[in-house]
Amino acid sequence: MQVFKFGGTSVGTPQRMKDVCNLITADGKPKIVVLSAMSGTTNSLVEAAEYLKIGNPEAAGNVINGLRRKYREHIPALYATEEMQVETRELLDNIFLELHDCRALKFSDAVEKDVLSKGEIMSTNMVTNYLRECGIKACLLHALDFMRKAKNGEPDMLYIREHINALLEEHAGYDIYITQGFICRNFDGEVDNLERGGSDYTATLVGAAIRSDEVQIWTDIDGMHNNDPRFVEGTTPVRQLNFEESAELAYFGAKILHPTCIQPARYMGVPVRLKNTMDPAAPGTIINNDMEPGTIKAVAAKDNITAIKIVSSRMLLASGFLCKIFSIFDRYKTSIDMIATSEVGVSLTIDNTSRLAAIVERLKKIGTVQVDNNMCIICVVGDLRSENTGFETVATEALRDVPLRMISYGGSNHNISFLVSMDDKKAALEALQKTLFGTK
Ligand code: ASP
Ligand code: MG
Protein backbone atom coordinates (compact mmCIF):
# COMPACT_ATOMS: atom_id res chain seq x y z
CA MET A 1 0.00 0.00 0.00
CA GLN A 2 1.24 3.48 -0.82
CA VAL A 3 1.48 6.33 1.66
CA PHE A 4 0.66 9.86 0.47
CA LYS A 5 1.40 12.96 2.52
CA PHE A 6 -0.06 16.40 1.89
CA GLY A 7 1.30 19.53 3.57
CA GLY A 8 -0.58 22.51 4.94
CA THR A 9 -0.82 24.42 1.66
CA SER A 10 -2.15 21.35 -0.15
CA VAL A 11 -5.09 21.22 2.28
CA GLY A 12 -5.12 24.99 2.87
CA THR A 13 -8.63 25.72 1.53
CA PRO A 14 -11.82 23.68 1.02
CA GLN A 15 -11.09 23.63 -2.71
CA ARG A 16 -7.58 22.32 -2.12
CA MET A 17 -9.02 19.62 0.13
CA LYS A 18 -11.33 18.57 -2.68
CA ASP A 19 -8.41 18.50 -5.11
CA VAL A 20 -6.50 16.26 -2.71
CA CYS A 21 -9.50 13.93 -2.51
CA ASN A 22 -9.64 13.71 -6.31
CA LEU A 23 -5.95 12.99 -6.43
CA ILE A 24 -5.96 10.21 -3.86
CA THR A 25 -8.96 8.45 -5.33
CA ALA A 26 -8.02 8.78 -9.03
CA ASP A 27 -6.32 5.39 -9.43
CA GLY A 28 -8.77 3.54 -7.18
CA LYS A 29 -5.95 1.95 -5.19
CA PRO A 30 -6.14 1.88 -1.40
CA LYS A 31 -3.69 4.14 0.36
CA ILE A 32 -2.80 5.74 3.65
CA VAL A 33 -2.98 9.52 3.49
CA VAL A 34 -1.11 11.62 6.03
CA LEU A 35 -2.32 15.21 6.36
CA SER A 36 -0.91 18.37 7.89
CA ALA A 37 -3.07 21.02 9.46
CA MET A 38 -4.54 23.63 7.09
CA SER A 39 -1.82 26.21 6.40
CA GLY A 40 -1.56 28.87 9.09
CA THR A 41 -3.39 26.80 11.68
CA THR A 42 -0.38 25.45 13.57
CA ASN A 43 1.08 28.96 13.66
CA SER A 44 -2.14 30.26 15.23
CA LEU A 45 -2.14 27.42 17.74
CA VAL A 46 1.47 28.20 18.62
CA GLU A 47 0.41 31.81 19.17
CA ALA A 48 -2.47 30.74 21.41
CA ALA A 49 -0.15 28.47 23.41
CA GLU A 50 2.32 31.33 23.83
CA TYR A 51 -0.43 33.50 25.31
CA LEU A 52 -1.34 30.69 27.69
CA LYS A 53 2.28 30.36 28.66
CA ILE A 54 2.61 34.01 29.64
CA GLY A 55 -0.68 33.91 31.52
CA ASN A 56 -2.95 35.76 29.11
CA PRO A 57 -5.86 33.35 28.52
CA GLU A 58 -8.00 36.15 27.11
CA ALA A 59 -5.64 36.76 24.21
CA ALA A 60 -5.38 32.99 23.69
CA GLY A 61 -9.19 32.94 23.53
CA ASN A 62 -9.17 35.62 20.84
CA VAL A 63 -6.75 33.65 18.70
CA ILE A 64 -8.87 30.51 19.12
CA ASN A 65 -12.06 32.38 18.22
CA GLY A 66 -10.40 33.82 15.13
CA LEU A 67 -9.54 30.31 14.00
CA ARG A 68 -13.03 29.06 14.79
CA ARG A 69 -14.59 31.73 12.58
CA LYS A 70 -12.35 30.69 9.68
CA TYR A 71 -13.18 27.02 10.10
CA ARG A 72 -16.90 27.78 10.25
CA GLU A 73 -16.63 29.40 6.83
CA HIS A 74 -14.95 26.32 5.39
CA ILE A 75 -17.88 24.06 6.20
CA PRO A 76 -20.48 25.24 3.63
CA ALA A 77 -17.67 25.54 1.09
CA LEU A 78 -16.64 21.92 1.61
CA TYR A 79 -19.84 19.93 2.07
CA ALA A 80 -22.83 19.78 -0.22
CA THR A 81 -25.26 18.15 2.21
CA GLU A 82 -26.81 19.79 5.24
CA GLU A 83 -26.29 16.56 7.14
CA MET A 84 -22.52 16.54 6.71
CA GLN A 85 -22.31 20.25 7.40
CA VAL A 86 -24.07 19.77 10.74
CA GLU A 87 -21.99 16.74 11.64
CA THR A 88 -18.68 18.43 10.86
CA ARG A 89 -19.65 21.72 12.51
CA GLU A 90 -20.42 19.83 15.71
CA LEU A 91 -17.16 17.97 15.51
CA LEU A 92 -15.12 21.14 15.01
CA ASP A 93 -17.08 22.96 17.72
CA ASN A 94 -16.11 20.23 20.16
CA ILE A 95 -12.47 20.64 19.25
CA PHE A 96 -12.70 24.40 19.78
CA LEU A 97 -14.37 23.76 23.14
CA GLU A 98 -11.44 21.55 24.09
CA LEU A 99 -9.09 24.36 23.07
CA HIS A 100 -11.01 26.81 25.24
CA ASP A 101 -10.90 24.29 28.11
CA CYS A 102 -7.09 24.35 27.89
CA ARG A 103 -7.23 27.96 29.02
CA ALA A 104 -8.37 26.86 32.47
CA LEU A 105 -5.51 24.40 32.89
CA LYS A 106 -2.18 25.13 34.50
CA PHE A 107 0.17 25.66 31.58
CA SER A 108 2.60 22.84 30.94
CA ASP A 109 4.43 21.18 28.09
CA ALA A 110 1.59 18.68 27.84
CA VAL A 111 -1.03 21.46 27.53
CA GLU A 112 1.01 23.14 24.81
CA LYS A 113 1.37 19.90 22.83
CA ASP A 114 -2.33 19.22 23.22
CA VAL A 115 -3.17 22.66 21.80
CA LEU A 116 -0.78 22.17 18.86
CA SER A 117 -2.31 18.79 18.01
CA LYS A 118 -5.73 20.18 17.12
CA GLY A 119 -4.84 21.46 13.65
CA GLU A 120 -4.14 18.01 12.25
CA ILE A 121 -7.12 16.55 14.10
CA MET A 122 -9.39 19.08 12.39
CA SER A 123 -7.99 18.77 8.87
CA THR A 124 -8.12 14.97 8.91
CA ASN A 125 -11.69 14.89 10.18
CA MET A 126 -12.75 17.41 7.55
CA VAL A 127 -11.19 15.45 4.70
CA THR A 128 -12.50 12.10 5.96
CA ASN A 129 -16.03 13.51 6.13
CA TYR A 130 -15.71 14.96 2.65
CA LEU A 131 -14.62 11.60 1.24
CA ARG A 132 -17.55 9.90 2.98
CA GLU A 133 -19.93 12.45 1.56
CA CYS A 134 -18.55 11.60 -1.87
CA GLY A 135 -19.38 7.94 -1.22
CA ILE A 136 -15.80 6.80 -0.72
CA LYS A 137 -15.05 4.25 1.97
CA ALA A 138 -12.74 6.35 4.11
CA CYS A 139 -11.39 5.41 7.52
CA LEU A 140 -9.75 7.83 9.95
CA LEU A 141 -6.86 6.20 11.78
CA HIS A 142 -5.96 8.27 14.82
CA ALA A 143 -2.23 8.94 14.94
CA LEU A 144 -2.44 9.14 18.73
CA ASP A 145 -3.39 5.43 18.70
CA PHE A 146 -0.19 4.30 16.97
CA MET A 147 2.46 7.06 16.73
CA ARG A 148 4.59 7.02 19.81
CA LYS A 149 8.01 8.04 21.01
CA ALA A 150 10.29 5.76 22.98
CA LYS A 151 11.95 6.73 26.24
CA ASN A 152 14.82 8.41 24.38
CA GLY A 153 12.39 10.77 22.64
CA GLU A 154 12.80 9.13 19.24
CA PRO A 155 9.90 7.46 17.41
CA ASP A 156 9.33 3.95 18.74
CA MET A 157 9.46 1.96 15.51
CA LEU A 158 8.44 -1.35 17.08
CA TYR A 159 5.40 0.17 18.78
CA ILE A 160 4.38 2.06 15.66
CA ARG A 161 4.72 -1.01 13.45
CA GLU A 162 2.75 -3.24 15.76
CA HIS A 163 -0.06 -0.75 16.36
CA ILE A 164 -0.61 0.58 12.86
CA ASN A 165 -0.62 -2.89 11.36
CA ALA A 166 -3.12 -4.04 14.00
CA LEU A 167 -5.35 -1.05 13.22
CA LEU A 168 -5.17 -1.72 9.49
CA GLU A 169 -6.14 -5.32 10.08
CA GLU A 170 -9.01 -4.31 12.33
CA HIS A 171 -10.26 -1.83 9.71
CA ALA A 172 -9.56 -3.85 6.59
CA GLY A 173 -11.35 -3.19 3.32
CA TYR A 174 -11.43 0.62 3.20
CA ASP A 175 -10.47 2.58 0.07
CA ILE A 176 -8.63 5.35 1.88
CA TYR A 177 -7.09 5.58 5.33
CA ILE A 178 -6.58 9.12 6.57
CA THR A 179 -4.27 9.95 9.46
CA GLN A 180 -2.70 12.96 11.15
CA GLY A 181 0.86 13.99 10.46
CA PHE A 182 3.02 15.60 13.11
CA ILE A 183 1.21 14.40 16.24
CA CYS A 184 2.11 11.46 18.43
CA ARG A 185 2.33 10.41 22.05
CA ASN A 186 5.40 10.47 24.23
CA PHE A 187 6.67 7.55 26.27
CA ASP A 188 4.28 8.42 29.09
CA GLY A 189 1.32 8.45 26.73
CA GLU A 190 0.87 12.23 26.72
CA VAL A 191 0.16 14.09 23.50
CA ASP A 192 3.40 15.10 21.82
CA ASN A 193 4.63 15.95 18.33
CA LEU A 194 7.48 15.37 15.90
CA GLU A 195 8.49 19.04 15.81
CA ARG A 196 7.35 21.69 13.36
CA GLY A 197 7.10 20.39 9.82
CA GLY A 198 7.03 16.85 11.20
CA SER A 199 4.27 15.48 8.98
CA ASP A 200 6.84 14.31 6.44
CA TYR A 201 8.41 12.31 9.23
CA THR A 202 5.05 10.75 10.08
CA ALA A 203 4.68 9.71 6.45
CA THR A 204 8.04 7.96 6.24
CA LEU A 205 7.55 6.33 9.64
CA VAL A 206 4.19 4.98 8.49
CA GLY A 207 5.72 3.94 5.17
CA ALA A 208 8.49 2.05 6.94
CA ALA A 209 6.08 0.52 9.47
CA ILE A 210 3.79 -0.97 6.82
CA ARG A 211 6.69 -1.64 4.40
CA SER A 212 5.00 0.53 1.83
CA ASP A 213 5.88 0.30 -1.89
CA GLU A 214 6.41 4.04 -1.96
CA VAL A 215 5.88 7.14 0.14
CA GLN A 216 4.77 10.20 -1.81
CA ILE A 217 5.26 13.63 -0.27
CA TRP A 218 3.01 16.15 -2.02
CA THR A 219 3.91 19.81 -1.70
CA ASP A 220 3.44 22.90 -3.81
CA ILE A 221 6.72 22.75 -5.68
CA ASP A 222 7.95 20.46 -8.34
CA GLY A 223 10.25 18.16 -6.38
CA MET A 224 13.68 18.97 -5.01
CA HIS A 225 15.43 21.60 -7.12
CA ASN A 226 19.10 21.57 -8.03
CA ASN A 227 19.59 24.94 -6.33
CA ASP A 228 17.64 27.39 -4.20
CA PRO A 229 15.00 29.01 -6.45
CA ARG A 230 14.72 31.95 -4.05
CA PHE A 231 18.26 33.02 -4.90
CA VAL A 232 19.04 31.55 -8.29
CA GLU A 233 17.17 31.70 -11.56
CA GLY A 234 16.78 28.71 -13.83
CA THR A 235 16.85 25.97 -11.19
CA THR A 236 15.36 22.67 -12.29
CA PRO A 237 13.90 19.70 -10.40
CA VAL A 238 16.26 16.83 -9.70
CA ARG A 239 14.67 13.61 -10.97
CA GLN A 240 16.47 11.18 -8.68
CA LEU A 241 18.42 11.39 -5.45
CA ASN A 242 20.09 8.82 -3.31
CA PHE A 243 18.84 8.68 0.31
CA GLU A 244 22.18 10.05 1.53
CA GLU A 245 22.15 12.89 -0.96
CA SER A 246 18.65 13.92 0.03
CA ALA A 247 19.49 13.75 3.73
CA GLU A 248 22.44 16.10 3.17
CA LEU A 249 20.30 18.47 1.11
CA ALA A 250 17.47 18.53 3.63
CA TYR A 251 19.86 19.13 6.49
CA PHE A 252 21.80 21.78 4.64
CA GLY A 253 18.88 23.93 3.82
CA ALA A 254 16.67 22.52 1.06
CA LYS A 255 13.35 23.51 2.60
CA ILE A 256 11.29 20.87 0.89
CA LEU A 257 11.83 17.94 3.26
CA HIS A 258 12.01 17.64 7.02
CA PRO A 259 15.67 16.68 7.67
CA THR A 260 15.09 13.57 9.78
CA CYS A 261 12.24 12.23 7.71
CA ILE A 262 14.39 10.34 5.26
CA GLN A 263 15.87 8.04 7.93
CA PRO A 264 13.01 5.56 8.37
CA ALA A 265 12.56 5.25 4.60
CA ARG A 266 16.25 4.68 4.05
CA TYR A 267 16.32 2.14 6.84
CA MET A 268 13.54 0.08 5.30
CA GLY A 269 14.49 0.87 1.70
CA VAL A 270 11.11 2.46 0.94
CA PRO A 271 11.41 4.91 -1.98
CA VAL A 272 10.17 8.44 -1.33
CA ARG A 273 8.73 10.46 -4.18
CA LEU A 274 8.30 14.24 -3.98
CA LYS A 275 5.31 15.42 -6.00
CA ASN A 276 3.63 18.72 -6.81
CA THR A 277 -0.07 19.13 -5.96
CA MET A 278 -0.33 22.03 -8.42
CA ASP A 279 1.06 19.90 -11.26
CA PRO A 280 0.28 16.24 -10.47
CA ALA A 281 1.47 14.98 -13.85
CA ALA A 282 5.03 16.26 -13.31
CA PRO A 283 7.41 13.44 -12.41
CA GLY A 284 8.82 15.12 -9.28
CA THR A 285 11.85 13.67 -7.50
CA ILE A 286 12.35 10.06 -6.50
CA ILE A 287 14.61 9.31 -3.54
CA ASN A 288 15.90 5.75 -3.31
CA ASN A 289 19.02 3.63 -2.91
CA ASP A 290 20.29 4.19 -6.46
CA MET A 291 23.39 6.24 -7.07
CA GLU A 292 23.76 7.92 -10.41
CA PRO A 293 27.48 7.51 -11.06
CA GLY A 294 29.59 10.57 -11.65
CA THR A 295 26.85 13.16 -11.37
CA ILE A 296 26.59 16.27 -9.25
CA LYS A 297 22.96 16.61 -8.30
CA ALA A 298 22.26 19.76 -6.37
CA VAL A 299 23.39 22.66 -4.24
CA ALA A 300 21.85 23.87 -0.98
CA ALA A 301 22.70 26.54 1.55
CA LYS A 302 22.30 26.75 5.28
CA ASP A 303 22.22 30.24 6.79
CA ASN A 304 23.14 31.78 10.13
CA ILE A 305 26.18 29.69 10.73
CA THR A 306 28.86 30.65 13.21
CA ALA A 307 32.46 29.61 12.59
CA ILE A 308 34.90 29.10 15.42
CA LYS A 309 38.63 28.77 14.89
CA ILE A 310 40.89 27.51 17.65
CA VAL A 311 44.62 27.85 17.08
CA SER A 312 47.21 26.46 19.43
CA SER A 313 50.84 25.54 18.97
CA ARG A 314 50.21 23.03 21.74
CA MET A 315 48.20 21.04 19.22
CA LEU A 316 51.36 20.21 17.31
CA LEU A 317 52.13 16.52 17.79
CA ALA A 318 49.91 16.40 20.88
CA SER A 319 47.20 13.81 21.26
CA GLY A 320 43.82 14.49 22.82
CA PHE A 321 43.53 18.06 21.52
CA LEU A 322 40.44 17.46 19.39
CA CYS A 323 38.89 15.41 22.14
CA LYS A 324 39.21 18.35 24.52
CA ILE A 325 37.55 20.65 22.01
CA PHE A 326 34.71 18.28 21.22
CA SER A 327 34.00 17.60 24.86
CA ILE A 328 33.40 21.31 25.39
CA PHE A 329 30.81 21.38 22.62
CA ASP A 330 29.30 18.19 23.96
CA ARG A 331 29.10 19.61 27.44
CA TYR A 332 27.01 22.53 26.12
CA LYS A 333 24.90 20.25 23.91
CA THR A 334 25.91 22.16 20.80
CA SER A 335 26.31 20.12 17.68
CA ILE A 336 29.00 20.76 15.11
CA ASP A 337 28.22 20.78 11.39
CA MET A 338 31.47 21.32 9.52
CA ILE A 339 35.02 20.80 10.60
CA ALA A 340 38.47 21.39 9.12
CA THR A 341 41.78 20.78 10.82
CA SER A 342 45.43 21.58 10.35
CA GLU A 343 48.37 20.68 12.49
CA VAL A 344 48.01 23.79 14.62
CA GLY A 345 44.36 24.62 14.50
CA VAL A 346 40.76 23.58 14.05
CA SER A 347 37.87 25.41 12.44
CA LEU A 348 34.35 24.26 13.01
CA THR A 349 30.83 25.55 12.61
CA ILE A 350 27.69 25.55 14.69
CA ASP A 351 24.19 26.85 14.05
CA ASN A 352 22.93 27.00 17.61
CA THR A 353 24.68 29.87 19.36
CA SER A 354 22.69 29.81 22.60
CA ARG A 355 25.73 28.56 24.58
CA LEU A 356 28.39 30.28 22.50
CA ALA A 357 29.72 32.58 25.22
CA ALA A 358 30.33 29.70 27.63
CA ILE A 359 31.90 27.59 24.90
CA VAL A 360 34.27 30.35 23.84
CA GLU A 361 35.27 31.00 27.43
CA ARG A 362 36.34 27.38 27.81
CA LEU A 363 38.01 27.19 24.40
CA LYS A 364 40.13 30.20 25.29
CA LYS A 365 41.86 28.06 27.91
CA ILE A 366 43.09 25.81 25.11
CA GLY A 367 44.07 28.22 22.36
CA THR A 368 43.44 31.46 20.54
CA VAL A 369 39.82 31.67 19.50
CA GLN A 370 38.27 33.52 16.60
CA VAL A 371 34.51 33.67 16.05
CA ASP A 372 32.89 34.65 12.75
CA ASN A 373 29.15 35.19 12.63
CA ASN A 374 26.84 35.48 9.64
CA MET A 375 28.36 32.66 7.71
CA CYS A 376 26.63 30.26 5.37
CA ILE A 377 27.34 26.64 4.46
CA ILE A 378 27.05 25.89 0.77
CA CYS A 379 26.70 22.20 0.24
CA VAL A 380 27.18 20.46 -3.11
CA VAL A 381 25.84 16.91 -3.29
CA GLY A 382 26.31 14.18 -5.80
CA ASP A 383 28.52 11.23 -6.51
CA LEU A 384 31.73 12.51 -4.96
CA ARG A 385 33.43 9.18 -4.33
CA SER A 386 37.15 9.78 -4.35
CA GLU A 387 37.78 7.41 -7.26
CA ASN A 388 35.65 9.76 -9.36
CA THR A 389 38.26 12.38 -10.00
CA GLY A 390 37.59 15.95 -10.87
CA PHE A 391 34.13 16.65 -9.45
CA GLU A 392 35.27 18.52 -6.37
CA THR A 393 37.65 20.51 -8.56
CA VAL A 394 34.74 21.72 -10.67
CA ALA A 395 32.85 22.89 -7.59
CA THR A 396 35.88 24.60 -6.12
CA GLU A 397 36.81 26.18 -9.43
CA ALA A 398 33.28 27.60 -9.75
CA LEU A 399 33.87 29.47 -6.50
CA ARG A 400 37.23 30.94 -7.47
CA ASP A 401 36.01 34.52 -7.00
CA VAL A 402 34.25 33.85 -3.70
CA PRO A 403 36.25 34.11 -0.46
CA LEU A 404 36.10 30.65 1.13
CA ARG A 405 36.43 30.42 4.89
CA MET A 406 36.37 26.61 5.09
CA ILE A 407 36.09 23.56 2.84
CA SER A 408 34.98 20.15 3.99
CA TYR A 409 35.32 17.16 1.71
CA GLY A 410 35.62 13.45 2.33
CA GLY A 411 33.23 13.24 5.31
CA SER A 412 30.91 11.23 3.11
CA ASN A 413 30.87 10.12 -0.49
CA HIS A 414 28.09 12.53 -1.22
CA ASN A 415 29.05 16.05 -0.41
CA ILE A 416 31.53 18.84 -0.39
CA SER A 417 30.75 21.85 1.77
CA PHE A 418 32.04 25.39 1.59
CA LEU A 419 31.74 28.02 4.27
CA VAL A 420 31.26 31.52 2.94
CA SER A 421 30.05 34.82 4.35
CA MET A 422 26.29 35.39 4.06
CA ASP A 423 27.13 38.41 1.89
CA ASP A 424 28.65 36.07 -0.70
CA LYS A 425 25.88 33.47 -0.59
CA LYS A 426 23.97 34.58 -3.67
CA ALA A 427 27.11 34.96 -5.76
CA ALA A 428 28.31 31.51 -4.67
CA LEU A 429 24.99 29.82 -5.48
CA GLU A 430 24.85 31.53 -8.87
CA ALA A 431 28.42 30.61 -9.74
CA LEU A 432 27.79 26.97 -8.85
CA GLN A 433 24.55 26.93 -10.83
CA LYS A 434 26.32 28.26 -13.91
CA THR A 435 29.27 25.91 -13.71
CA LEU A 436 27.60 22.73 -12.50
CA PHE A 437 24.25 22.91 -14.27
CA GLY A 438 25.01 25.23 -17.15
CA THR A 439 22.44 27.90 -16.33
CA LYS A 440 22.63 31.24 -14.65
N1 ASP B 1 1.31 21.35 11.07
C1 ASP B 1 2.65 21.18 11.51
C2 ASP B 1 3.46 22.43 11.20
O1 ASP B 1 2.95 23.36 10.62
C3 ASP B 1 3.29 19.96 10.94
C4 ASP B 1 3.46 19.95 9.43
O2 ASP B 1 2.82 20.70 8.72
O3 ASP B 1 4.24 19.15 8.96
O4 ASP B 1 4.59 22.48 11.57
MG1 MG C 1 4.03 22.14 6.88
Image (cartoon, helix red, strand yellow):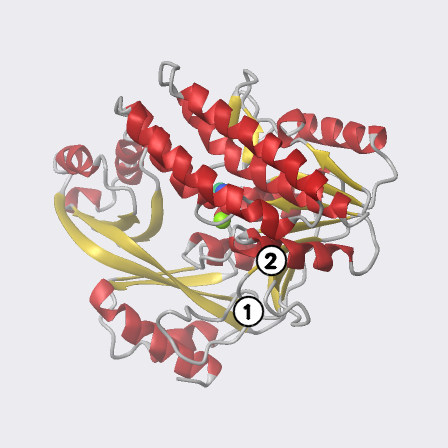
Q: Within 8 Å of ligand 2, the CB of disc 2?
A: no
Left or right of 388? Residue 31 is right
Q: Looking at this view, is 149 or 16 the one in front?
A: 16
In the displayed structure, 89 sits above or below 390; it is above
Q: Which sits in the foreground, 122 or 284?
A: 122
Mark 2–mark 1 CB contact (< 8 Å): no
Task: Say which amino acid is labelled 1.
Answer: Glu
Q: Is residue 81 visible?
A: yes
Which image quarter: residue 145? top right
Which quadrant of the figure has residue 173? top right
For label 1, the SS is loop
Tell me the crowding category of disc 1: few under 14, some 14 to 19, or many 20 or more residues within 10 angstroms, Cα based. few
Quarter of the image where the C terminus is located: bottom left
In this image, 347 relative to 11: left or right?
left
The residue to which callout 2 is attached is 15
SS type, badge 2: helix
Q: Quadrant of residue 112?
A: top left
Answer yes or no: is residue 152 visible: no
Query: Residue 143: x percent and y percent?
Result: 64, 32
According to the picture, the residue beneath numbered tag 1 turns out to be: 387
Q: What separation in Å lies between label 2 and label 1 (alpha carbons)?
A: 52 Å
Residue occupying image coordinates x 29% and y 30%: 59
Residue at the spot x=56%, y=33% of the render?
A: 92
- Position of 248 relative to 117 (above/below): below
Q: Residue at x 49, y 71 (%)?
A: 226
- Give whichever of discs 2 and 1 has the lower sequence position: 2
Front position in the image: 338 or 51: 51
Identity of the amino acid at label 2? Gln
